Image: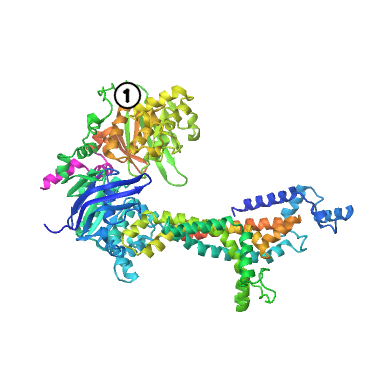
Amino acid sequence: MSSLPALFGVLVFTFLLMRVLPGDPAVFFASGPNAGKEEVELIRKQMGLDKSVPEQLTLYLYDVGRGNLGRSMMTGQLVTKDLRERLPASLELTFTALLIALVSAVPLGVLAALKPGSIIDHGVRLFCALGVCVPTFVSGLLLIYVFYYLLGLAPDPTGRIDVFTSMPPSRTGFLMIDFLIAGDIDGWWAAFRQLILPALSMALFVIAPLARITRASMLVSLGSDFVRTARSVGLSWRHVVVTYALRNAILPVITIAGIVFSTMLGANVLVEKVFSWPGVASYALDALLSSDYAPVQGFVLLMASLFVLVNLTVDVCYGIADPRVSIE
Amino acid sequence: MTEPLLKIDNLHVSFSTRRGVVEAVRGVTLSVQEGEVLGLVGESGSGKSVTGFATTRLLDAAGRVTAGKILFRGQDVTKLSSDDLRHLRGAAMSMIFQNPRSALNPIRAVGQQIADAILTHKRMSKEAAHAEALELLRAVQIRDPERRMAAYPHELSGGMCQRVMIAIAISCNPALLIADEPTTGLDVTTQKVVMDLLAAIASARGMATILITHDLGLAARYCRRIVVMEQGRLVEEAAPRTLFNAPRHPYTKRLVAASPTASSRIEDLVPEEERGYVAIGDRPKPPPAPGTPPLLEVRKLAKRFDQGAAAVAEFSMTMAAGESVGLVGESGSGKSTTSRMICRLIDPSEGDIVFDGQSIGHVPARDFHRSPFRKDIQMVFQDPNESLNPRFTAFDCIAHPLMRLAGLRGGDALRQRVEECAQRVGLPADLLPRFPHQLSGGQKARVGIARAIACRPRLLVLDEPTAALDVSVQAVVLQLLDRLRREDDLALLFVSHDLNVVRMICGRTIVLRNGAIVEQGESRALFDNPKSDYTRELVAAIPNIEIETRRAAAAL
């Protein structure tokens, strides 16, 4: 509830920003470059662009309040419908990427922290540096080159599913889950093969911050008094590292994972483009390039809401993991 | 004589640091018999804790035993494999640490942590371990142990956490217990209860104990034999009585002299030739003429933090110029809150503060830095490490209030004033360009005091100014404060939990409990003949060398 003012601010800000950006949507969406003045005026009137900006804003806010985000000029569909269709694709990709990142980053960070200054530590550092400095579209293209072109292991990078597989009945929008519900293992495998490369190239980018924070907080944790206590009573090495050190060290990782997730949602536009992934980010980029106001505004609102939701989830997770934090 | 339980032979421990190898322990030899209680006493950097950690092989990664043997039941601990070591730790020897709150896992229920220790060394079901953990909580006298089993460390007080720590340490009945400053940071009354408990458990279960402490009085109260360490070496070993009545080594002599006792006077703390300044004779000041308004008058001061009960209520006091008043009480008694209100760092909820005839209680704390009285009321903070800006040199620290409050704009005048202040607190001028991390604890304390007296205040509020210092440094700082008081007619409001220190330095003492004044009066009378039960309890809890040694003498 306390996030409503922030959401409202985001809404107004994006609205104004879109109006300030150069480009006239009416001209863009007119039938052609030689469309007559009357035709452009007509479109402008249809879109409500002839009214003053405050008036447009009021109308827009009124619409948003009723759950209407407007209509996309590109697809001709309602923005809410477009987003609803495309959001699961983005979410599925981001969740998978985050999962891959966490599953590899946490052990890497722990390994590095157990032997600081060792070969392993330096190796992890090098790997992280590479992951950060190579842009996602480069790593994406590299992965395609190696696994699709050279090795032929991966399917062609054209969307969520290849042309020969039929879509499962849509329940959640997440293909991995929908196929499972439908009991279609071949379809699941096909979708998984499509998903793994883009998820991997996105994960590579965020492994670095996650591994680094794991290493840092693990070092603090291992050097703490309570780990010394655990060692002083002769607890086994595994017990000390996992139950005492890692469980404490994981707390800041949860926070960072939340931030990383929100960043990935917006920043995965490059990956979506490279792999022709029908997600929300590439949708918003296309809309932005064609001065299509409604989808961009809808996208930003969606991202802001997701951000709020992710923060809430992180807070709840934190409250469960750390008894010192009380959930209200 | 039977084979001792623990025999440390010519132990050397060194730490590799950025500035090269530092030898922390240089040739310590000592032994502990079964069931014996040994005190290991020394100031910071003496190597006493390092010796303890070396014995359980819990040194930091940078620390290494370079020579010597640690024989535990004839087995050399320094040569054990990590597997054998694991069977030894907890089962045969265990440790109790300083700062119990951080020594416990913050996100694991305390019962679980005790059970962890039990399950490591005994084959039993989880339920049985749980039941045993509950028994242990009972043994360390935690109230309502069933409920506390599921509590997390942050839900318990410091004293309770230390009891849990003791429960963990004794869970497998080790033969040797090493307690590293087990009660530092606890209130005096809690300190006594915890130490009594520890001593009772150790003697009931026949555990040998090494008590590592900086507090001579504490060691005297609980140990049969005391070993004194200085700079990694063992300088003296004796029974408490001999040690205090006839110390042989010069360091022990200094240490005994510097430890404040019930009857010690401030002049006795440091031998004359080491004071670094010439003591001026104590000219007894004529009492202020009747009718002179007091320097500070506090009327019915109260502070309520949001919602909660009052942290301080109905607090009234007066102070004359040149007077020193002690404010004592346990943690949570409101003494720090009161001192902060008086030096106008926080706003009182009710009441008034009158300084030099003018009401200052209603100036918001936020704006008080603009008040002309800001330079008259200054403060010295508890931790000299934390209260100095790490990016300011000692010179900057002292110069800052002069520039802000006295309007000095740099140049020679400022330099002169800073150097003068440094000289008054006995800080050599060549230390002024140094940053805090390049100074020792005592030097930092001096910078803090120099900063506070730079603007020639008339009231100095000191919040536990010596709590973080070694006794020998504390002795010097206390003398310095007393000298400043006499020379400048400076009024001192001294907040402390150390009653021996307050008794020495303060003419008058106010005892606080739960935000209310329990008792006040002339210090010596108050401590010698306390009126309220609470004060009596506080006084009884101070580990007191003379009383202890007398008791020991009576027992012989």
Q: Find residue B106 and report its horizontal and vertical position in percent.
A: 40, 56
Please give the residue where the numbered disc 1 appears in the rendered image.
B487
The reply to whether residue B522 is visible in this rendering is no
Task: Report the side of A2 relative to B210 (left or right).
Answer: right
Q: Find residue A152 and report its horizontal and vertical position in percent.
A: 63, 72
Residue type of the residue flagged with mark 1: Glu
The reply to whether residue B125 is visible in this rendering is yes
The residue located at (69%, 63%) in the rendering is A83
Task: Report the side of A133 relative to A273 (left or right).
Answer: left
Q: Give the structural element (helix, strand or loop) at label 1.
A: helix
Q: Name the quarter where the N terminus of chain B is drawn.
A: bottom left
State whether the magenta stretch is mostly helix, strand or loop: helix
**B463 or B344: which is nearer to us?**
B463
Q: Based on the picture, tell me whether residue B444 belongs to the magenta stretch.
A: no
Task: Report the side of B298 relative to A153 (left or right).
Answer: left
**B70 or A250: which is nearer to us?**
B70
The residue located at (26%, 60%) in the rendering is B79
Task: Report the side of B212 relative to B107 (left or right).
Answer: left
Q: Find residue B169 and report its horizontal and vertical position in percent.
A: 29, 59
* Quarter of the view holding residue B264: top left
Chain identifier of the residue bearing label 1 in the image: B
Q: How crowded is mark 1: few (under 14 residues within 10 Å), some or many (20 or more)?
A: few
The residue located at (40%, 56%) in the rendering is A222
Region of the chain picked out in magenta, as a range: B529-556
Q: Based on the picture, tell me whether residue B531 belongs to the magenta stretch.
A: yes
Work out whether A191 lies above or below B385.
below
